[in-house]
Amino acid sequence: MLGLMQNWPLLIHKIIDHAATQHGGREVVSRSVEGPIHRTTYRDIRQRALRCAKRLTQEGIRPGDRVATLAWNTWRHLESWYAITGMGAVYHTINPRLFPDQIAWIANHAEDRILMTDLTFVPLLEALADKLPTVRRYVVFTDAAHMPATKLKNAVAYEDWIAEADEDFRWIDCDENAAAGLCYTSGTTGNPKGVLYSHRSNVLHSMAMSAPDCLGLGARGVILPVVPLFHANSWSIAFSAPMSGAKLVMPGAKLDGASVYEMLESEQVQVTAGVPTVWLMLLQYMEKEGKRFSHLKRCVIGGSAAPRAMIEAFETVHGVEVFHAWGMTEMSPVGSIGSIKPGLAHLQGDALFDLKETQGFAPFTVEMRIDDDQGRPQPWDGKTFGRLKVKGPCVAGGYFRGEGGNILDANGFFDTGDIATIDENGYMRITDRAKDVIKSGGEWISSIDLENCAVAHPDVAEAAVIGVRHPKWDERPLLVVVPKEGRTIDGAALLAFMGERIARWQLPDDVQVVAEIPHTATGKINKLRLRDTFKDYTLPTI
Amino acid sequence: MLGLMQNWPLLIHKIIDHAATQHGGREVVSRSVEGPIHRTTYRDIRQRALRCAKRLTQEGIRPGDRVATLAWNTWRHLESWYAITGMGAVYHTINPRLFPDQIAWIANHAEDRILMTDLTFVPLLEALADKLPTVRRYVVFTDAAHMPATKLKNAVAYEDWIAEADEDFRWIDCDENAAAGLCYTSGTTGNPKGVLYSHRSNVLHSMAMSAPDCLGLGARGVILPVVPLFHANSWSIAFSAPMSGAKLVMPGAKLDGASVYEMLESEQVQVTAGVPTVWLMLLQYMEKEGKRFSHLKRCVIGGSAAPRAMIEAFETVHGVEVFHAWGMTEMSPVGSIGSIKPGLAHLQGDALFDLKETQGFAPFTVEMRIDDDQGRPQPWDGKTFGRLKVKGPCVAGGYFRGEGGNILDANGFFDTGDIATIDENGYMRITDRAKDVIKSGGEWISSIDLENCAVAHPDVAEAAVIGVRHPKWDERPLLVVVPKEGRTIDGAALLAFMGERIARWQLPDDVQVVAEIPHTATGKINKLRLRDTFKDYTLPTI
């Protein structure tokens, strides 16, 4: 027997409708790519999104078509999302930091029809345009006065282009499971894979994220997403801010410490969110200039693990509460966030920061488990490693065009590829990537923990740990180190140093000193190449 | 094209699963009907709900069957909801304050299979049992030691009954639109009508209610629902508290000022919710005893309009923020709630309380409009009256068994039967019931406003306003008054008094002094009977 409640599908445009109706005058403040600060409101964002949606329709875009955006966080980019989804198409966010070939690959895989971009990226796209045959038109987020001369196909300034349509447009009424957004993961192996969000998944994720233990966004909130819209839906903020009526502050192209600080202060921002790199720039700027926050209360840090020193600096120096979060493009993206549960509210000092170093706990709508290689659940004791698996309405069930095949296990969980512990209070800590963890005699050793321990030695500039075959233990860790300039490293002494900090059975079996460790384009250690370099290596202790 | 996110239906048992996993040790504290304070946790609530679900299955209950509860707010009542919905059946909450005949009518209309109740209501049910042929078994929320001798069919103590099953039970996996709960509205005319909630509507409503501008519930929250579970899902609290990990404090049968105060204090409650009647008792108790709150921060008042003096007492005397809310059984039930938008954050004193007297604004998931009789939208100016209509995923689309036929208008909106204004900031104020508003020459006059104005006169004990036919204006207001003991009322003087407070065109055309005004069983003015009394009356001024 079905209930008798109304059929009201969870569609993205209902968010901007709600914002325009209930919080119409609430500001959206952006640092424009052209330079000046720009101020608008949710009411105007909606009106212009309607215009843009109508213009997309006139352009021949149909429901399900992909419209790419390669752009900074500004009001125009925000409008484009509501326009694209509001007429049934799919926004495809492209990360400008990808290699040009990757950009071309995913734009072709997505079959993007229109590409909307910022002035910043026109040269990049001009160099790429020959490789983007599906793109019929380039729309540049600017006005006629700032529009550059360009040979990009049918290039037009966004302001001119939407001026060709009026606001007399009706949002599409569709299945809430219809595709709404597309974002590719930048896998280190194989081709990028597209995560195809639905209206439902984005709306539900934003409702979950508005809760007090996540973003805690109400109508009186002010939030600045440093995290880009192209970084997995800006962690829901493009939706959750208008949903709650919070003022939205957009940093545009300027993510340096001084620029971010200026906007946090001048717009009285209470909540912000971004990756560790930008916070490092911000904290360094503030320390150098002797600056303090006047309004900031909460800083969400995700994307990669927040260093403990960064968490401590925010909390103890600046009085800002850090919410350490973890997520994935496949998770819409937030999977866990580190607010403090009541049983731990007494923690202070090191004990508090130990907790804050974890990636927090899963909010409602996220189910989480850690399994061994046979899919057996592992205990939540804060020590036992397991493959981190997740389930929920905002978690991918498959990739675009079936890439990667069936990605769910027999229980319907998605394997994140991460290795994690979960403690008795539900706090999850990522300990390694599954492909990097060393499996030694049934026990798993974190390569990251060993690397962190090795670089604490004064002679070590960089360290990498890989697993090498072992006849008895299957795998044992090999430590590869680069000495600091002018230093030499004694392997035995280094292991002795590490032995004071790490259990004996986890210690690397050998140390190899090298001049250089290979890196990927994004600066991470390239363990694939490192393993290849040491493919003929045999352990001395066998 | 559909998105590729996981199929994870919004099912109620996922709430208690989440609570048990992430907030397993968080307390649920109840004043038991037997007397003592009882303490349990979400983990144990879930375990016992699994047991109860299995026991229901053994009893022959099938998905879609209705299981009635006629009970106070305690942990056992809470468990029963998760058990009933977790095995696919439908909880049907019965309000014990209804007339016995009404209870029998709705239990028969619902075809309740099992009735779960408290010790308090055993005598009531014994008197009614002959009229409840569909009920196969009565389960009393108590243990063997407290179980009374009763002739109720197959009566059993809840603790004995669930002890006959173990916890090895798997929640049902069903469509999120499946029926989950049933609650009848107590219409003043016609038979009660059943609102049939779905899993989806209850889960979405609870997600919306957890937001900072509604209940603002996080894991460190502590909430006491004075509002009963039988009063429209206890305004979502039975779901939103475990969803967020907040501690849940249940007042049991004792809703007097002293008992509620004691629990608010001893359990360090931060948020509470209930109808004006209980707050009146609480405030009177506190004034008399010179008590103060130590922890309470937020009080949600709904069910009927909160008197201004009550709002002022909470805010100015006790420093507790009042969230004035409005809702209906048909809305799951919350439709609007009065947090303060940023543009109004500067308001103080009378201006602030003017705002707090409104019923607040609609949260995301609720669409609201005010229409004239022809369905044309009226301006949001805080003055123009309109029929209040609502739309959303937690709003009824029809009544159980098709009672009332199609209840949605051409735009898919549900007509609440209320007359309201909405101001330019979205704040809604209920001004009258649609059947009571006086329609005079195209303008609508609030009977309630006139009554409130009349009773402010020192000689008036009670006042009622009804519309009477008028050849030119269609309807004009007639004021019916009861004088205070020992006083006499001069109609002209009373109208002159009112004329200083109310626009001339709204003033009643006549005053009739009577000895008594008829009331309904719940104490409201019976305007149906009053209109009947004055059906042959003609206005003097025609």
Image (cartoon, coloured by chain):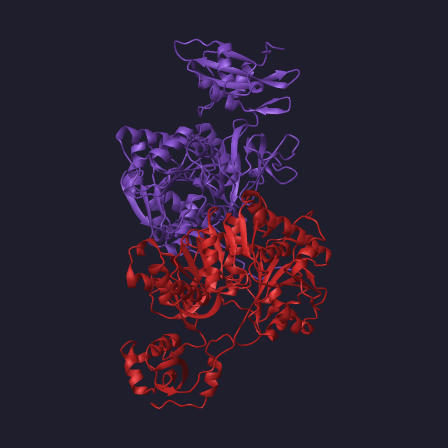
Chain colours: A red, B purple
Residue at 36% in and 58% down: A318
**Residue situated in front as seen by the camera: B442 or B12:** B442
Give the image quarter of residue B152. Answer: top left
Q: Which corner quadrant of the image does residue B413 belong to? A: top right
Above or below for B256 versus B158: above
Q: Quick one: quadrant of the C terminus of chain A?
A: bottom left
How many numbered circles are shown?
0
Tell me if A102 is positioned left or right of A352 in this view: right
Report the front residue among B262 and A96.
A96
- Measured as percent of width and height from the top left, residue A460 is found at 36, 81
Give above or below for B517 relative to B51: above
Relative placement, left or right, of B490 versus A59 is: left
Residue B175 seen in render: no
Residue A434, position in %: x, y? Answer: 44, 74
Q: Residue furthest front?
A: A289
Q: Position of residue B457 (x, y in %)?
A: 44, 16
* Residue A437 relative to residue B366: left or right: left
What's the residue at 27%, 34% (across, down)?
Answer: B291
| Residue B342, placed above or below residue A33 | above
Residue B474 found in image quarter: top right
